Image (tube, rainbow, N blue to C red):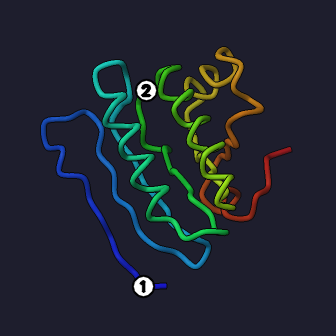
Amino acid sequence: MLGFIVESNQQNQELRWTARTAPEGLIVQVSGQVDAHNESVWQRMLSESAAATPDASMLVVDAGSLDFMSCGALVALAKQTVDSRQRGVTLRLVIRQPSIMRVITQCGMDDAVSAHPDLNSALDGHHPP
C-alpha cells in the first residue's frame, strides 16, 4: 500500500483532520469539534476517508482530540460504518473524552459505534474491561 498523508485545508472551520496509511488501513486523526454547523464537513471527511480505505481493511477515526461531538455526527459515523462494512472495511472510533462517551451512550449508539479508548486498542479490536 502506498503511504500518504492528507490534511484538511479547513482553516476557518472548527474541524481539522489528518489521514495517513497504516498496515491495517487508514487512520484519520481529527481535532476541534463536530456540531450542526460543520456536520456536512464531518460527513464529507468520513465519506472521502472511507473511499480511500482499501477493501477488507480498517478505517480508524482517532477523535481523541475532539472537544465536542454531536448526536448528528454519531449518526453519520454509524451510517458510514454500515456503508463501509459492505466493502469489508471495519470502522472504529478512538474516543478519550468521557463527555463524548456519554453522548454516544445517551444517543443509544453503543452498539452502532465501535468506540475505543486509544489507537492501539482500536487497531487490535479490544474494548476495555
Farthest residue, direction left: 12
Secondary structure at badge 2 equals strand
Query: In this figure, which residue is indicated by the disc labeled 2?
Result: 68
Farthest residue, direction top: 106
What amino acid is at disc 2? Answer: Phe
Secondary structure at badge 1 equals loop
The picture places residue 96, in percent across and down from the top left corner, at: 57, 40
Q: Are marks 1 and 2 in contact (CB under 8 Å)?
A: no
Query: In this figure, which residue is indicated by the disc labeled 1?
Result: 2
Residue at point 79% right, 48% down?
127
Quarter of the image holding residue 49? bottom left
Residue at point 26% right, 59% down?
7
Quarter of the image holding residue 77? top right
The picture places residue 24, in percent across and down from the top left corner, at: 62, 73
What amino acid is at disc 1? Answer: Leu
Q: In the image, is residue 92 above or below residue 111?
A: below
Q: In the image, is residue 80 above or below residue 92?
A: above
- Crowd class of label 2 (few under 14; some 14 to 19; many from 20; radius 10 Å): some
The picture places residue 41, in percent across and down from the top left corner, at: 31, 36
Residue at point 33% right, 31% down?
40
Depth check, front residue: 96 or 12? 12
Q: Is residue 8 left or right of residue 103?
A: left
Residue at point 71% right, 34% down?
112
Q: In the image, is residue 75 above or below residue 84?
A: above
- Crowd class of label 1 (few under 14; some 14 to 19; many from 20; radius 10 Å): few
